Amino acid sequence: MTLPLNFHHLHYFWAVAHEGNLTRAAERLHVSQSAVSVQIQRLEAELGHPLFERRARQLILTEAGRITLDHADAIFAVGRELVGTLKERGRERTVLRVGSMATLSRNFQLQFLRPLLRRVDVEIVVRSGSLADLLRGLEAHRVDVVLANTAPPRDAATPWVAQPLADQPVSLVGLPKSAREGRSLEEILSTEPLLLPPLETGIRADFDALAARLGVTPRITAEVDDMAMLRLLAREHVGVAVVPSIVVRDELQRGELAEIARLPGLHEVFYAITLARRFPNPLLAELLPTTDARASDAKNGGA
């Protein structure tokens, strides 16, 4: 027979998880640190999993700890509603924490999250940063999934699961008046001022290789690591941008920008990066395609 959860133990855990420190949690609860520590040990025994690990005097939530905190937040929110007012405050929501590379296409991020955006029972938290910082957050259970356009290296020490979501062609995009017919790709690259991603990106490496094969020296006006800024500079007619089509999808549909030329062999792959978890966030199952769906998507050339 399974014993009921001791909510007294859970409350002590909840206080420590939010304070991130035993001393502050004990002061908040008006008890000794040893009392708090004992209550958490008992909760861990009840649940059968460690909830914290110590790193350089810090208490870091384990994966089981993050899951427990999500449930504790919901439980105590319901308790506050019970003893508060009878005013309707809506259903408690499931939280999805997403890490996204700061330079990633906003259109792609929106497309990925769209199935959950109007769900009243879902709260989405999006954090931007470098890929290295986001992967550290994923490992520490601060985010559930990382969106990136680069697959991280995978080895025994860092067992990331990088799932391809879309494979987008890369084009030259500029104002409609730049899309004159009859010009070769070599002529366009030699005469148009170009807006390029920085040297360390995969798109730039592929573009430089293409230019070398064609024997042209591009006119580079600017190198920009932010796709939103590339789009803005193209709209301001600063130059012709080298971007995946999804980045400027809205401008293309409205006729504000035009695809001047498709760059052969250039594409950008978008990934959802996760870690194998014993307790995965159930919302990810609604966002990540199945094996059959991925195969169909690859056959049709991506989303």
Image (cartoon, rainbow, N blue to C red):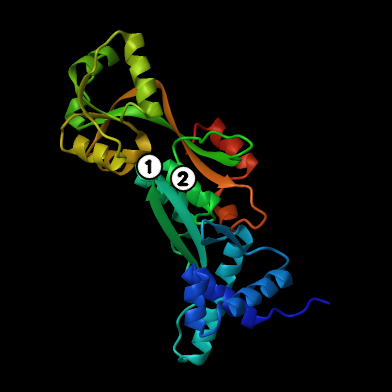
Q: Is residue 207 above or below residue 158?
A: above
Q: Amino acid at mark 2?
A: Leu
Q: CA distance from mark 1 to mark 2?
A: 8 Å
Q: Residue at x 52, y 33 (%)?
A: 300
Residue closer to the observer: 101 or 257:
101
Q: Is residue 4 visible?
A: yes
Q: Amino acid at mark 1?
A: Leu
Q: Which residue is mark 2?
A: 147
Quadrant for residue 229, please give it. top left
Quadrant for residue 4, please give it. bottom right
| Left or right of residue 31: residue 64 | right
Quadrant for residue 227, please give it. top left
Q: Secondary structure at mark 1?
A: loop
Q: Secondary structure at mark 2?
A: strand
Q: Which residue is mark 1?
A: 104
Q: Is residue 286 above or below residue 43?
A: above
Q: Residue at x 56, y 81 (%)?
A: 32
Q: Is residue 182 visible?
A: no
| Quadrant where the N terminus is found in the figure | bottom right
| Left or right of residue 51: residue 77 | left
Q: Is residue 202 above or below residue 117?
A: above
| Left or right of residue 67: residue 127 | left
Q: Is residue 156 above or below residue 24?
A: above
| Left or right of residue 252: residue 131 | right
The label shown at residue 249 is none
